[in-house]
Amino acid sequence: MSAIRVRASGPLAGSVPIGGAKNSVLKLLAATLLAPGEHVLRNVPAIVDVECMSELLRTMGCTVERFEPHALRIVRPETITPEAPYELVERMRASIVVLGPLLTREGRARVSLPGGDDFGSRPIDMHLKGLEMLGARFTTAHGYIEAEAAELHGTRVTLEYPSVGATENALMAAVLAKGTTVIDNAAREPEIWDLASFINRMGGRILGAGTSTITVEGVSPDELSGVEHTVVADRIEAATYLTAVAVAGGEIVLEGARADHMDMLIQKLGDMGLRTSPDPAGLWAMAPPRLRAVDVATLPYPGVATDYKPLMVTMLAVADGVGIVTENIFRGRFRYVDELVRMGADIRTDDHHAIVRGVDRLSGAPVRAPDIRAGAALVIAGLRADGETVVHDAEHIDRGYEDLVGRLRALGADVEHA
Ligand code: UD1
């Protein structure tokens, strides 16, 4: 169990590096299963979830080595064991995306049913349905999915909802399917586009990634080979530092951030009074003396991401006025609100809405991080809380952030590992 101690800080100043996206690199690692050979991924953040996915690849027989602080070399041998054990899948839900590449390359897979972040039920029915349309067959027994597909065939896969994970599984499975697959109502997240770019470099033929209609022309296994790829910038990590400056005040530069992947968020933050501008180094941001409240609803990309929500709620907690936050993706994802309330925030939740009445300052308190993003949001709340805030269960934060404490300190925040 680790903890982070925070004291009131600000204004923040300086530059902060934004690393590769957690939600991309985990899927890119799964995609290496498509092609035997050596793959190199650059701009890989040093976070626990990457270690977890690397461990999963190793249990299948791959070699994964961090040969530079932010680069991984993955050697995927010809023969692997297409199995994802409970111990690893349980630690990280994203591991379910090995299903698509394993099925299409190995013709079979055995994957534990996932656990993951503790915010409501996260079913995988759409993942399975998409793969079934391509010709896969599933049985479940003893907590495992047993999947089989002598051969996958290209077809039209219409997703009931633009699920990120279901899109990724269908996309990867289609890469080696016979014929053409069209994925309709596909998720449009930048991480999907990054995954398609990586696979296209390997020799895949994917068109339209980043739009709602993705077309995949199946290729034969010997057309794919290991390649080098740089992971797209993490828009959620960038949003985290934007929140830090918005809450604590000041002016910072987010090095390597992709403003074009955060349009809707930047628009919302602009409405709240935060000034931003694309910068040659990434993105510049300056806080107003006091944020203004706005309403916000989470939606699939390009809408405001569900991952931004704890950050938005934290900003609204210290903004001038009342904001209504609506969660449309994961209904149970308001657990951190009780922790913010313990810090003096005025928030009422009702089903999938939160009504946030801004207060000028919060009050430092011991709190508990329920998941990655909420954990980071609580640390940031501490920047505008009188006295001391200690965020317990901070190991959740290390799953998705490289050195959050060090990077905030470099911007002038009074924060340390407790
Ligand atoms: C989601 C987010 C993603 C975020 C990630 C990590 C969306 C659309 N997706 O991706 O931006 O980075 O969490 O926090 O915001 N669903 C089903 N059946 C399925 C799959 C999904 O009912 O088989 C539902 C989920 O319960 C949820 C919605 O569809 O309500 C979106 O799920 P999905 O996009 O798949 O989630 P992640 O891939 O985890």
Image: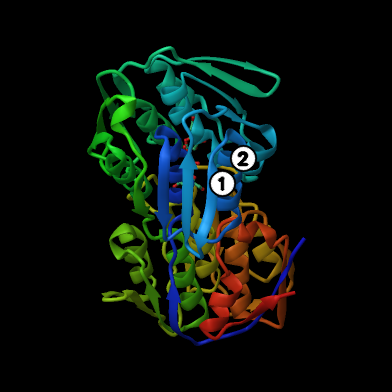
| Residue 46 position in % (x across, y down) | 55, 61
Left or right of 83? Residue 196 is left
Q: Residue at x 64, y 23 (%)?
A: 144
| Residue 99 is at least partly visible in this image | yes
- Dot 2 falls on a residue whose secondary structure is loop
Q: Tag 1: residue type?
A: Ser
Label 1, label 2: how far apart the Cα atoms are: 26 Å
| Quarter containing the C terminus | bottom right
Quick check: 347 above or below 385? above
Depth check, front residue: 314 or 148: 148
Count neighbours of disc 1 (C-alpha within 10 A) and say few if under 14, some if 14 to 19, many if 20 or more: many
Q: Quadrant of residue 367?
A: bottom right
- Dot 1 falls on a residue whose secondary structure is helix
| Residue 109 position in % (x across, y down) | 54, 23
Rendered image: mark on residue 138: none
Depth check, front residue: 214 or 301: 214
Answer whether labels 1 and 2 touch (C-beta < 8 Å).
no
Left or right of 66? Residue 154 is left
Ligand 1 lies under 8 Å from the Cβ of mark 2? yes
Quick check: 150 above or below 215? above
| Quarter containing the N terminus | bottom right
Ligand 1 lies under 8 Å from the Cβ of mark 1? no
Q: How many marks?
A: 2
Q: Residue at x 72, y 80 (%)?
A: 388
Depth check, front residue: 62 or 101: 62
Rendered image: mark on residue 120: 2
| Residue 61 position in % (x across, y down) | 57, 35
Depth check, front residue: 269 or 139: 139
Rendered image: mark on residue 54: 1
